[in-house]
Image (cartoon, grey):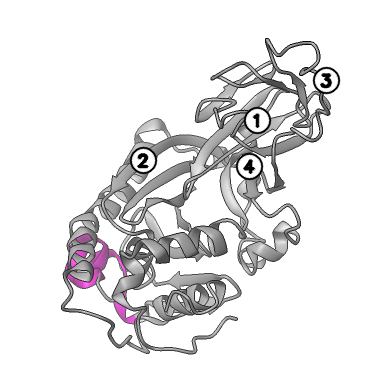
Amino acid sequence: MGGTANLKTLHAAGYHAPDAYTVERQMIFAREWLLLGHARELQSPGDYLAEAIAGWPVLVIRDKAGALKGFHNVCRHRAGPLVEDGCGHTAALRCRYHGWLYDTDGRLARRPDFSAGADAFDGRELALKPIAVAEWRGFVFVNLDVDAGPLTDGLGDLVTTTRDFPIERYSFYRRQTYDLSVNWKTYVDNYLEGYHIPLMHKGLARDLDMASYRVENADRVSIHRSSMRSEAAYQGLFLWRWPNNTIGVYGGGFNICRILPEGVRRTRLTFDFYFDPQAGLDADAKERAASTTCGIVEEDFPMCEVVQRNLEAGSYDCGPLSPKHEQGVAYFHDLVRHATGGRVT
């Protein structure tokens, strides 16, 4: 599905109607492979990662045999959490509410203070609900659908697009997080076109040869390329991967962003920055590259929030998309329509 079938935007209601968000949670974020983190955060048995993605609390833990196991971070007793959000280490998956204990296969091992008769139970029947986990080139992905197809199928042409890019040797530098008062699709729309760059990003427009700016849609990815006018942080290569990742490549490094819905009109952006040890960049050079990216990203926030307001105002329903500049937006909207069975249009 690399082309675009519809050069009109999604209808405005899809950006603020609670039922549209409910559909997307169930039909996109509960069915797609979603980036959770990096294997560097899960090096030893007992190391875990936990986060709520589109309202789904999930955790991944490395078991004693070194395998990655994934579960909903929800106790089967009264919905308490097994671990706090973030990364950490635990010797056991013990509910933080009432102390129910699970092994790293998710089976219930103990439920404190139940009577002797009531404590006869089948640990498998009250096991944690599992999720699928897979690793790709050091990055850890989860899928709430335990019968999901292979991760590489879910990644689509990201696999071939990055084949010659030595991701594995890059080292983590730092993380930057932003909380926006917008629907997740409002931010994705903004990322997927360079149409706004001359007006919104004066510095970036000076560095890029905007006449050469091109967007190529492939399977589950949108690839943005441009020639450079001057030496700058970016190398003129920007990627988006369905449904909620972006990648920016620059000299000696790259960043990967997770676009995380936290409600109908709340979105968290998490940017992780990586650098190539072989590039010889010092701390100042790394920070300049990361800060330049953050500065460009932040220039979009006021406009995204005003667009979100206007999408909710009632005077706008949908609009035409430029065949020259907005092929990426059109492809994204087609994917949303297809994934939701036309329930978000």
Question: Spatial distance from mark 2 to mark 3, Cα to Cα?
Answer: 46 Å
Residue 57 percent across, percent down from the top left: 54, 40
Of tags 4 and 1, which is closer to the observer?
A: 1
Q: Is residue 255 visible?
A: no
Question: Spatial distance from mark 3 to mark 4, Cα to Cα?
Answer: 50 Å
Of 86 and 74, which appears nearest the observer?
A: 74
Q: Main secondary structure of the magenta part?
A: helix
Task: Look at mark 4 in the image and give the residue it sits on.
Answer: 169
Q: What amino acid type is highlighted by mark number 4? A: Arg
Of 324 and 95, which appears nearest the observer?
A: 95
User: Magenta span has 177?
Assistant: no
Q: How many marks?
A: 4
Q: What amino acid type is highlighted by mark number 2? A: Thr
**With 306 as the anchor, is 25 left or right in this view?**
right
User: Magenta span has 207?
Assistant: yes
Q: What amino acid type is highlighted by mark number 1? A: Leu
Instruction: Using the image, tell me which numbered label, if any, was put on residue 42.
Output: 1
Question: Spatial distance from mark 2 to mark 1, Cα to Cα?
Answer: 21 Å
Of tags 2 and 3, which is closer to the observer?
A: 3
Residue 239 percent across, percent down from the top left: 48, 64
Task: Look at mark 2 in the image and give the residue it sits on.
Answer: 177
Residue numbers of the magenta segment: 197-211
Per the image, label 1 sits on a secondary structure element best described as: loop
Of tags 4 and 2, which is closer to the observer?
A: 2
Of tags 1 and 3, which is closer to the observer?
A: 3
Mark 4 or mark 3, which is nearer the start of the sequence?
A: 3
Q: What amino acid type is highlighted by mark number 3? A: Ala
Task: Look at mark 3 in the image and give the residue it sits on.
Answer: 120
Residue 115 percent across, percent down from the top left: 74, 11
